[in-house]
Amino acid sequence: MNNIYKSIYNEIKKYKKIYIARHIGPDPDAFGSQMALKESILLTFPSKEVYSVGATVARFKYFGHVDKVTDYDYENGLLIVTDTPDAKRVDIDNFLSFKHVIKIDHHPNVDKFGEVEYVNVNVSSASELVLELIENSKLKINESIAGNLYLGIVSDTNRFLYGTNYKTFEIVSKLIKKYNLDMDKLYRQVYSRPLSEVRLMGHIANTLKVDKNGFAYVELDDDIMQTFNSDASAASNMINDFNNINEIIIWVFVSKDKNNLYRVNIRSRGPEINEIAARHGGGGHKYASGVRTDNHEVIDSLLKDLSECARKYKEDNNGNN
């Protein structure tokens, strides 16, 4: 057993209470890695108390339920954080109060936290890391766990379009074969959407502002979201669908959530954007990042910096996207 896998397994084995957290504004990879790891630990150690914590998202209920925990054992419990590079985005109360922490992540490192850190930026997703952990330790897996991990990998690679290498295909193909996964059913869970969202997508396409640098953005206010019977999460569900527009190399969707926070989703077809997002209080992948803020001035500054980033990238590439 590799040292990192052995270290994580031994830590899991040691604690009776285990909490598994992920980042705020969770996506399918965050849920997939979190819920799969929880189920795997319980399958391996039925007597342990294992809780998945963080905000619930109704559209991702097929991953499993989030536990409501009001009394954390910060001193004696183990916290495992998946898919989160920076401490400020860990979605759990009083994160810094935990004495024992493990970090499992595939983003460029922002903050060091945890007695054990399993970070690899060369894999597709946190779900792939959790799958590798299970495959290389005594943790158990079943069809349900396999399905959640598959969905996490599929989503974070946008159906294997990016962040994927031969190792990803190898490990996924083994997963599909061994557990006879119903890929059509699993895909429908992630990619099926109501007609209202499709109509919202049409509105976005018609109102998207595109500048000469290849930078595009749209801001969706409350009235627009109500018109299309959608919420702030809808924009993040469709942003990847704008990936292959010739005139655009960086694009941004801005919407407000129920807490009056602006959710800013950022995508790129070339320029690295995660450091720009981090400068404005967000973070993420090189080509897929986000920011949350209650200050519109932050958004204005972010949009300006992203447009400039697109300009420099276009200039460096002789005007070619």
Image (spheres, rainbow, N blue to C red):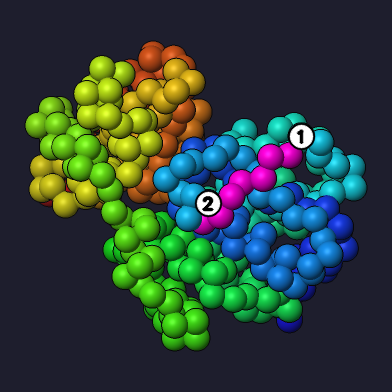
Q: Residue at x 42, y 45 (%)?
A: 59
Against 88, residue 300 (above or below) is above
Q: Secondary structure at mark 2?
A: helix
Q: Residue 10, located in which quarter of the rendered image?
A: bottom right
Say which label, 2 or 1, has the lower sequence index: 2
What crowding class fits label 1: few (fewer than 14 Cα within 10 Å), some (14-19), or many (20 or more)? few
- Inter-mark Cα distance, 2 to 1: 22 Å
- Residue 186 versus residue 205: which sits nearer the camera? 186
Magenta-highlighted residues? 63-69
Q: Residue at x 44, y 82 (%)?
A: 180
**Eye-nearest disc, 2 or 1:** 1
- Asked if residue 305 can be seen in this view, the reply is no
For residue 66: magenta? yes
Please state which amino acid type lies under the numbered disc 1.
Answer: Thr
Q: Give the main secondary structure of the magenta stretch.
A: loop
Against 123, residue 200 (above or below) is above
Please state which amino acid type lies under the numbered disc 2.
Answer: Ala
Q: Residue 267, located in which quarter of the rendered image?
A: top left
Q: Quadrant of the N terminus?
A: bottom right
Locate residue 241, reporting x and y percent.
22, 49
Task: Report the residue marked by disc 2.
Answer: 30
240 relative to 19 in the view: left or right: left
Locate residue 17, reporting x and y percent.
83, 53
Instruction: Tell me whether circle 2 and circle 1 mark residues in contact (CB < 8 Å).
Output: no
Q: Residue at x 64, y 71 (%)?
A: 133
Q: Which mark is residue 70?
A: 1
